[in-house]
Image: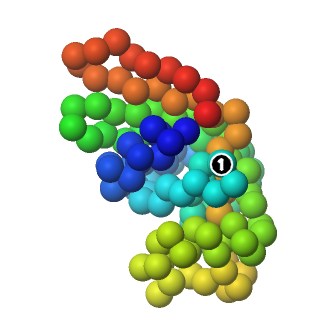
Amino acid sequence: MKEVYEFLKKCGVYYLATVDGDQPRVRPFGTAHIFENKLYIQTGKSKDVFKQIMANPNVEISGFTDGVWIRLSGKLIHDDRREARKSMLDAYPNLRGMYNEDDGNTAVLYFENATATFCSFTAAPRTFRI
């Protein structure tokens, strides 16, 4: 999991794919955080992406840096505990201009049963569970 986390941090921006009815939706994200040995991301409850994840928690992330890309597929679980929200926002203090742990909007979600695959044009893919 640490390798996935470090890769996403190095990318800076990765892309999260969800499903909206029968339509795929992809948007840039930038948060990746480890809390209680789980990989978390963050969004707002008022956003369509959160509503899409709640309707269908199966998502995929793709990120690219230095000639390598990742595909991270799994189920996102909403963790509505204050301590999880606070941990994320402490790791990303720049988000505190838009979110806080008690605003009723901040959502943190962690991956469950996820598979990460690292690929490049110069090496065989590496796949493992996180």
What amino acid type should be assigned to the residue bearing mark 1? Lys
Residue 35 place in picture, x, y as percent? 64, 57
List the residue tagged with mark 1: 38
The residue shown at (77%, 67%) is 80
**In which quarter of the view is residue 36 placed?**
bottom right
Residue 96 appearing in the image = yes
Q: Is residue 56 left or right of residue 123?
A: right
Residue 107 appearing in the image = no
Residue 77 place in picture, x, y as percent? 73, 51
**In which quarter of the view is residue 129 placed?**
top right
Residue 50 place in picture, x, y as percent? 64, 61
Q: How is the image coloured?
A: rainbow
Q: Is residue 31 above or below residue 75?
A: below
Residue 44 place in picture, x, y as percent? 60, 71
Disc 1, SS: strand
The residue shown at (46%, 26%) is 117
Q: Is residue 60 left or right of residue 37?
A: left
- How many numbered marks have been drawn onto this rendered protein structure? 1
Q: Is residue 94 left or right of residue 74?
A: left
Choose between 25 and 6: the one closer to the eye: 6
The residue shown at (58%, 54%) is 34
Residue at the far top in the pictured view: 124
Quadrant of the frame with the C terminus: top right
Residue at the far right in the pictured view: 81
Choose between 29 and 38: the one closer to the eye: 38
Mark 1 packing: few (<14 Cα in 10 Å), some, or many (20+)?
A: some
Quadrant of the frame with the N terminus: top right
Q: Is residue 20 above or below residue 91?
A: above
The residue shown at (50%, 55%) is 32
